[in-house]
Amino acid sequence: MLAVNADDAAVSAPLVSVRNVQKTYFTRQASVQAVASASLDVARGEFVSLLGPSGCGKSTLLMMIAGLEQPTSGSILLGGAEVKKPRRDIGVIFQDATLLPWKTSLENVLFPIRILKLPIEAYRQRAHELLKMVGLSGFEHKKPSELSGGMRQRVSICRALIHDPDILLMDEPFSALDAITRDQMNVALSEILETYKKTVIFVTHSIREAAFLSDRVVVMGGRPSTIALDMKMPFPRPRRFEIEETPEFAMVCRKLRLTIEQAHQGPPSTSSVVETRAGESRAGQIE
Amino acid sequence: MAPTGIGTETGAIIAGPALQKETGLANLRGIALPVALAAIVLVGWQLAVTLGHIPPVILPSPVSITKYIIDRYDILLMHAIPTTLESAAAFVLATLLGIALAIIITYSQIAREALYPNLVFFQLIPKIALAPLFIIWLGIGSQSRIAFSVFIAFFPIVIATTAGFANVDKGTLRLCRALTASEWQIFTSVRFPAALPHIFSGMKIAITLAIIGVIIGEFITAQAGLGYLIIFATARADTEISMAAIVVLCICGLLLYGLVALGESIANRFYSAESS
């Protein structure tokens, strides 16, 4: 029943440490509090999902960890040092693949190497290996317009891994894909991470996806949002699709869903405002 | 002009679906139809002049114009060279100036707020009216024609290039920031290539304006050039020379436009979203 990674997580200090982070956006008319207060530790090698409905501040939190946004108060430590700006040892994967349309898959994968001024030739072999790993051998010299959505996102995963960052930050990477492709991508991702061990923080609004991929799921909810639940996923690795059919998996999903609902129904004033975006309703249906 | 892929007149298409491959028949049709129409007009013109006994000073016939071009190609060439070179020089300067201004407008908010409205206002001035002033300022040499031509041609490049620089995908910019890319790296590896289709569509408009600018300059000052030849011949009621000069001018214009289109198709090879 215990999480497999629990013992090595306990040994070292957390790699990522989020301390009382609060984020408020100021516009001319009003201020909007996106994250009320979040504290979170992520150990080296751990896969942690931030789960919650759209607009709950989970992406904002991820962008702050990436150094792309600054917390209004509180601090984010990475290996003990405060994150003030983007760092080279982080790979970020966004909801859109954001590939350069005029570059081939291979050139897109090597793009970070160019930006980081590392020797391109030394990484070419690795780029080929990564593309092969995600099942894109033979597509190295295709441009994004010739690839499907899932293929493009796989290229962007390779791109995030090419310079071998310690940490992968993934912001709803599969939410633009259809359900079948998404399931395939989940399996592909967990296979990739068995080969290339990474610390991953993964933002999603799919309960099933979070439960399947993660060592720990952190539920964010409420407006302004806080962390409602921090739960270990008790499934052994390597994980295959079959675990989704176990009663244990169903129970975990149920618990996560109830937490999300409670977090959202908290103060009665907000319960009447229900945004029905595609993602939320989808996340709600899944058991 | 044949479709050249990314740089359509609207300039906005980069990731659009691949143009449908024209079949051989449709391709032939695309050439045959305009050629046939032009032939009909020319034959009609010739017949009207011959049968209608229109005097050559009013309208010389296509045959006599062609004959003149062949007979006196040396004179025409002599005048075509300065016009073409000055147009090309003005076009290059306008392109550099236009892109430089677009960079300033893109990267400096103060410059954008101060400069952009003035540029647009500037554009509303009937610029041709300013041509004589350039002669007062810069004399009667080629520098005043080139300066005037740059003045006429740079604006579409500024507008198109600024739009191109602003057209960059926000996600790509965020990715670059996450990778700790410098502004210079973002410019060279993302912004500039993404703006290329826009820049080329601006350049295609600018090249035609550059030629117009030089011709207007030559109308006013020159001792050589096709514009000068047209004015000179018209003053002497030598319509044939005038028409011949206009035909040569069209050929020079096509040549320059063709060079820009060639540059675009070379850029396309590296910066097109389509497979190469």
Image (cartoon, rainbow, N blue to C red):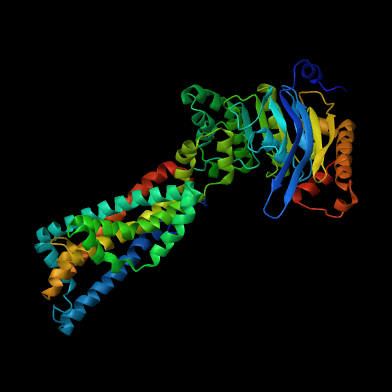
Which quadrant does the N terminus of chain B fall into? bottom left
Q: Position of residue A219 (x, y in %)?
A: 82, 37
Of residue B62 and residue A227, the one placed in the foreground of this image is A227
Can residue A146 be seen here?
yes
Of residue A48 and residue A263, the one placed in the foreground of this image is A263
- What residue is at 46 percent from the left and 60 percent from the top? B117
Relative to B217, say whether A135 is above or below: above
Relative to A81, say whether B51 is above or below: below
- What residue is at 76 percent from the left and 51 percent from the top? A277
Q: Position of residue B107 (x, y in %)?
A: 48, 46
- What residue is at 85 percent from the left and 51 percent from the top? A270
Can residue B11 be seen here?
no
Relative to B72, say whether A213 is above or below: above
Of residue A241 and residue B150, the one placed in the foreground of this image is B150
Q: Quadrant of residue A204?
A: top right
Q: Quadrant of residue B24?
A: bottom left
Asked if residue A159 lies left or right of residue B71, the reply is: right
Of residue A57 and residue A36, the one placed in the foreground of this image is A36
Which quadrant does the C terminus of chain B fall into? top left
Q: Position of residue B191 (x, y in %)?
A: 48, 44
Q: Position of residue B168 (x, y in %)?
A: 52, 47
| Outermost residue to the bottom | B52
